[in-house]
């Protein structure tokens, strides 16, 4: 899936007027390549023939079902650089081409159940549980096409370039005239004229213009149907036999639409997600693991960043980013502490709460309840400020628990780092 940085870059491409902020909400749903292809296929978008193998035996069956001149066998993990990756068995490459259907089963067998490491995976690699077997197509020409929600235009915007198959940010930097953008009126929808103009800007000519425009319209229909924030096709290509095909798709979804996109969100089995992040999400907590040893429990992303920065300023290293949000309950604080203390690398905990809509007394009750329930043995530094802070401090003091109070963020960071020595 496209990174937040990539999404921000795309938004900047759309902004000729005021520049747009790069802050965007975290989007947790990640789909495998075959899942994105399935969504496109169901919407009438042209993709290569493909099937998915869960076992080597499946692969043998699929090879017999796909009547194609050449196969591409691709390990399905949420990471780029698969073709140059290496499996823990020593097998090279998560993407292979073969014209012999008998080779497909062996290639799939070499991938399934083994960990593939690429430049984008964690150090230990990611276990491959599914392999896509697809029709290999020769791409004669590559273009780039995307539809994304853009605050600057107040709705969806098409972005295209005849220079596909490469980073769109690089194209924008070196040849900005090769980037074409067109806002779509959300009330009117994408017009035939808009789709045709974009197809022509992408370099399609003759009958291919109409074919490409038809694909562009169907991609917009998909964009709306699945509540996407971005549908990116790179490459949006033309084959040597004259077909217009969407070869690769990255789709980002609006988490706020999960209630009406249950089937799509159910496609994410979270097999590649950090178990701590999955556990946190069950309790409506936002968690990101890091490699330090001071756990940070805060309310608000900005406060989390400031807390991590000041810990490092005083010579410490944050172990995580745990944001309890603005509507936190005592029960959520309890589960947050359970999550933090389950990490063996955590040697101290720093709680930094600035209570606006958050009731500091609720936080304090959650802290004391958690400390008693899990018999907390780690140093705990707490800095509270804001709504009901006096009551909160009284709760902490009367708990008779070994909690170190801090007057401000700087004091809290100093005490948390000192607690490690």
Image (spheres, helix red, strand yellow):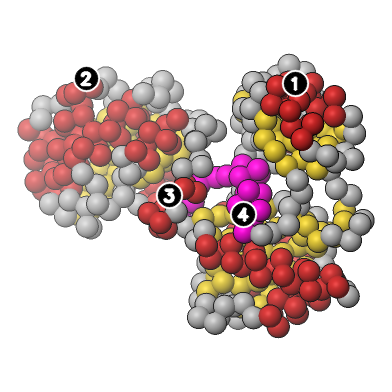
Secondary structure under tag 1 reads helix
Q: Is residue 273 left or right of residue 413?
A: right
Q: Are marks 4 and 3 in contact (CB under 8 Å)?
A: no
Q: Is residue 40 magenta?
A: yes
Secondary structure under tag 4 reads helix
- Between discs 4 and 1, the one toward the N terminus: 4
Q: Is residue 188 left or right of residue 236?
A: left
Q: Position of residue 171 (x, y in %)?
A: 78, 63
| Nearer the observer, 331 or 198 | 198
Q: Is residue 414 above or below residue 353?
A: above
Residue at 49% of width from left, 49% of height from top? Answer: 264
Span highlighted in magenta in the image: 23-43
Residue 318 in sight from this viewpoint: no
Q: Which residue is mark 3?
A: 262
Q: CA distance from mark 3 to mark 2?
A: 39 Å
- Between discs 3 and 1, the one toward the N terminus: 1
Q: CA distance from mark 3 to mark 1?
A: 34 Å
- Between discs 2 and 4, the one toward the N terminus: 4
- Between discs 3 and 2, the one toward the N terminus: 3
Residue at 77% of width from left, 68% of height from top? Answer: 212
Comparing marks 3 and 1, which lies closer to the viewer?
3
Q: Position of residue 50 (x, y in %)?
A: 73, 42
Q: Which residue is mark 2?
A: 375
Q: Is residue 271 magenta?
A: no
The quarter of the displayed image where residue 246 is located: bottom right
Q: Which residue is mark 4?
A: 42
């Amino acid at each position: 899936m496209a990174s937040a940085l990539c999404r921000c870059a795309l938004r900047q491409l759309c902004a000729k007027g005021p520049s747009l902020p790069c802050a965007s909400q975290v989007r947790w749903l990640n789909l495998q390549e075959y899942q994105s292809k399935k969504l496109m296929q169901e919407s009438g978008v042209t993709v290569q023939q493909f099937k998915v193998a869960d076992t080597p035996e499946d692969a043998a069956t699929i090879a017999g079902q796909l009547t194609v001149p050449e196969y591409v066998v691709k390990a399905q993990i949420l990471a780029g650089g698969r073709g140059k990756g290496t499996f823990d068995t020593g097998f090279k490459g998560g993407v292979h081409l073969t014209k012999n259907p008998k080779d497909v089963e062996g290639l799939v067998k070499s991938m399934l159940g083994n960990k593939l490491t690429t430049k984008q995976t964690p150090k230990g690699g990611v276990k491959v549980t599914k392999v896509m077997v697809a029709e290999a197509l020769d791409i004669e020409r590559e273009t780039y096409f995307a539809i994304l929600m853009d605050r600057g235009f107040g709705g969806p915007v098409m972005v295209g370039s005849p220079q596909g198959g490469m980073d769109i940010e690089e194209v924008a930097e070196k040849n900005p005239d090769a980037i074409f953008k067109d806002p779509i009126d959300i009330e009117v929808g994408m017009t035939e004229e808009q789709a045709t103009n974009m197809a022509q800007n992408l370099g399609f000519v003759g009958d291919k213009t109409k074919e490409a425009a038809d694909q562009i319209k169907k991609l917009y229909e998909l964009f709306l149907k699945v509540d996407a924030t971005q549908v990116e096709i790179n490459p949006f290509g033309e084959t040597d036999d004259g077909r217009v095909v969407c070869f690769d798709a990255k789709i980002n979804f609006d988490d706020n639409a999960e209630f009406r996109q249950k089937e799509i969100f159910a496609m994410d089995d979270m097999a590649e997600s950090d178990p701590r992040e999955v556990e946190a999400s069950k309790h409506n907590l936002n968690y990101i693991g890091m490699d330090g040893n001071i756990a940070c429990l805060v309310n608000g992303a900005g406060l989390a960043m400031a807390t991590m920065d000041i810990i490092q300023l005083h010579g410490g290293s944050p172990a995580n980013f745990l944001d309890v949000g603005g509507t936190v309950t005592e029960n959520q604080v309890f589960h947050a502490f359970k999550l933090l203390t389950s990490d063996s690398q955590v040697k101290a905990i720093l709680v930094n709460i600035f209570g606006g809509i958050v009731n500091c007394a609720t936080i304090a009750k959650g802290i004391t309840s958690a400390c008693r329930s899990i018999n907390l043995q780690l140093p705990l530094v707490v800095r509270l400020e804001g709504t009901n802070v006096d009551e909160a401090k009284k709760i902490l003091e009367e708990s008779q628990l070994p909690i170190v109070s801090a007057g401000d963020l700087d004091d809290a960071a100093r005490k948390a780092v000192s607690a490690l020595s």
